[in-house]
Image: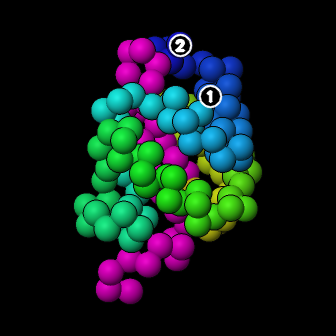
């Protein structure tokens, strides 16, 4: 499915991904990811106590996101835009912390192999500021 991203496949992925989060269905969210996915977010260092800001594998994501959903019962994402790249796409949305851009890189089988989340400056308490 994701070998050759098109406008329609990128938009369909983004709509389904946001819908899965808004349903608070962790297994539905995780269905988009490869077993050995690498995920990067500045909030991993804060909430998962992993200083690198990186998690590897679905099991680690499940634990991290399940805790987040438990602590944020009103979590809701509003899709703002979908940006298409070469073998990647970025979902630009508004979450509970403000604007977020999450970029996804896909494996040959159409699963997210690597993803990174970026937040508006000022939303993340970075060291030394």
> What is the span of residues highlighted in magenta in the rendered image?
101-129
Asked which secondary structure carries label 1, the reply is: helix
Residue in the image at 51% along x and 53% along y: 66
**Residue 128 picture quarter:** bottom left
Q: Position of residue 117 (x, y in %)?
A: 47, 52
The answer to whether 50 appears left or right of 20 in the picture is left
Task: Answer above or below: position of 84 versus 75.
Answer: above
Q: Position of residue 25 (x, y in %)?
A: 63, 41
Residue corresponding to mark 1: 13
Asked which secondary structure carries label 2, the reply is: loop
Q: CA distance from mark 2 to mark 1?
A: 10 Å
Residue in the image at 38% along x and 22% along y: 107
Residue 42 in sight here: no
Q: Position of residue 64 (x, y in %)?
A: 43, 55
Residue corresponding to mark 2: 1
Q: Nearer the viewer, residue 65 or 99?
A: 65
Task: Answer above or below: position of 114 versus 63.
Answer: above
**10 Å crowding of disc 1: few (<14), some (14-19), many (20+):** some
Q: Nearer the viewer, residue 33 or 11?
A: 33
Residue 105 in sight here: yes
Task: Answer above or below: position of 129 versus 66.
Answer: below
Q: Position of residue 80 (x, y in %)?
A: 72, 48
Given the current orientation, which residue lies at the most extreme bottom position? 129
**Residue 111 picture quarter:** top left
Residue 80 circle label = none
The answer to whether 113 appears left or right of 73 in the picture is left
Q: Nearer the viewer, residue 108 or 83?
A: 108
Q: Quadrant of the C terminus?
A: bottom left
């Amino acid at each position: 499915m994701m070998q050759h991203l098109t406008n329609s496949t990128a938009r369909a992925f983004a709509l389904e991904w946001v819908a899965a989060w808004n349903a608070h269905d962790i297994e539905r969210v995780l269905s988009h990811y490869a077993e050995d996915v690498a995920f990067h977010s500045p909030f991993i260092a804060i909430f998962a106590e992993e200083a690198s800001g990186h998690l590897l594998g679905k099991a680690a994501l499940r634990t991290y996101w399940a805790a987040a959903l438990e602590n944020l019962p009103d979590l809701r994402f509003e899709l703002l835009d979908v940006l298409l790249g070469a073998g990647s796409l970025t979902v630009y949305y508004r979450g509970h912390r403000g604007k977020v851009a999450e970029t996804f890189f896909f494996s040959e089988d159409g699963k997210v192999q690597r993803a990174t989340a970026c937040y508006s400056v000022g939303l993340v308490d970075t060291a030394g500021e």
